[in-house]
Image (tube, grey):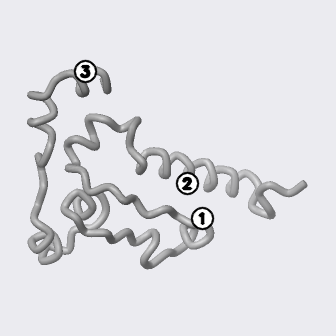
Amino acid sequence: MRDIYDDHTGLQDRFRGCGRVSPELATKLGLLGLAGAQSGIARDVRCDLPCAPYDALDVARSPSTTAATLRRALPYASIEALESTRLIIAITAALLDPAGVGRS
């Protein structure tokens, strides 16, 4: 899929900027998460107001402000997908060994 996207500028043009909301409108609407990030809002409640289990996971804030449509088209290349996978592994490991993940 990445090769197809990279080889077709017309496809790139259709994805670039699609679904984007201005930062002013995004703030007014209170957009967070993917919708906020694609609009230039660098808020992530997992980082800004962490509660369990995120308070113990050192969540990496996504630097991406790429339009959400493009992000959905190239999910395997997304920093967010990699971070989500890391968090799922950490949470699952904690569920399997709640007394101490990684004990020797």
Q: Residue at x 32, y 55 (%)?
A: 64
**Residue toward you, 90 or 10:** 10
Q: Amino acid at mark 2?
A: Leu
Q: Where's residue 67, x and y in %?
A: 20, 50
Q: Earlier in the sequence, mark 3 or mark 1?
A: 3
- Which quadrant is home to the N terminus? top left
User: Vertically, is 78 above or below 27?
Assistant: above
User: For mark 2, what is the residue?
Assistant: 87
The residue labelled by disc 1 is 57
Q: CA distance from mark 3 to mark 1?
A: 35 Å
Q: Are marks 2 and 1 in contact (CB under 8 Å)?
A: yes
- Classify mark 3: residues with Cα within 10 Å, few (<14), some (14-19) or many (20+): few
Instruction: Give SS at disc 2.
Output: helix
Q: Earlier in the sequence, mark 2 or mark 1?
A: 1
Instruction: Judge by depth and name the residue closer to the eye, 101 or 44.
Output: 44
**Kind of residue indicated by mark 1:** Leu
In front: mark 3 or mark 1?
A: 3
User: Could you tell me which residue is drawn at 61 percent across and 55 percent down?
Assistant: 91
Mark 3 highlights which residue?
Answer: 4
Q: Secondary structure at mark 3?
A: helix
Residues at marks 2 and 1, CA–CA distance in whole angstroms? 7 Å
Q: Is residue 22 left or right of residue 3?
A: left
The residue sitting at 24% across, 51% down in the picture is 66
Disc 1 packing (10 Å; few <14; some 14–19; many ≥20): some
Gap between marks 2 and 3 measured at Cα:
30 Å
Q: Work out whether 11 lies above or below 72.
A: above
Q: Amino acid at mark 3?
A: Ile
- Identify the element where label 1 is drawn: loop
CB atoms at circles 2 and 3 under 8 Å apart?
Answer: no
Indicate the position of residue 9 as horizontal and vertical percent values: 13, 28
Whether residue 23 sits left or right of residue 59 in the image: it is left
